[in-house]
Amino acid sequence: MAILKVANLGNPILRVPSDPVKNIQAPEIQRVIDDMLETMREYRGVGLAAPQVHRSLQIVTIELDADLGAPPAPVASPTVLINPRIVPATEQSEEDWEGCLSIPGLRGKVPRYTDIEVQAHDRRGRPLNFTAHDFFARVIQHEYDHLIGTMFLDRMKSLETLTFLEEYGRYWARREDAE
């Protein structure tokens, strides 16, 4: 396994739709998945999409701590979604903070659906169909956006909450703790 270089905002690969994976069991695809998991853990991310590591493939990896909202059964952790499709399972959305390994040091409030229906394949090629809720749904939507060439900045209602992490800790986190 290897730690891969993460593409930063401005790299064209982050702005184009990625290609479907044709042969999930191919050794090179399995290697990409392993490398993505190692890269995500190295940079302490909760999710990573293949375009972020310079691969135009529809692959997403997610790993949440139990206190952040475990994936529903039968979805394993870490979660690997290949060729995912998502649709809202509700009209309810919630605005909350997001960051991105491809936009290091920045965070902003992004509206996302609270519940989504997900169809994908796991790393063994088995079909997955499940409903994701809350933070897990947010992470899937964020990573799915990378597969269609969209960044979280594009989803923000207003750039007024866009902040560097240091300023987030100094001002925004305190304000939210007080509420």
Image: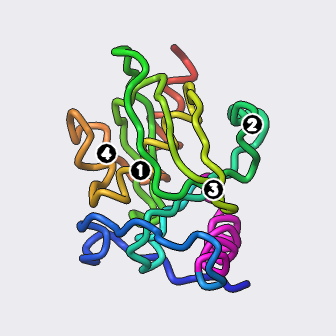
Query: Tag 4, which secondary structure?
Result: loop
Q: Which disc number belongs to residue 80? A: 3
Task: Establish if 19 lies above or below 113.
Answer: below
Q: Which residue is mark 4?
A: 162
Magenta residues? 29-46
Pinpoint residue 54: horizontal percent, then vertical percent.
42, 80
Query: Tag 2, which secondary structure?
Result: loop
Q: Amino acid at mark 1?
A: Tyr
Q: Which residue is mark 1?
A: 144
Mark 4 or 1, which is nearer the eye?
Answer: 1
Query: Tag 3, which secondary structure?
Result: strand
Q: Which disc number belongs to residue 74? A: 2
Label 1 crowd bin: few (<14), some (14–19), many (20+), radius 10 Å = many
* Mark sitting earlier along the chain (4/1): 1
Please name the residue shown 40% across and 26% down the image: 113
Asked if disc 4 and disc 3 are in contact, CB closer than 8 Å, the reply is no
In this image, 114 relative to 154: left or right? Answer: right
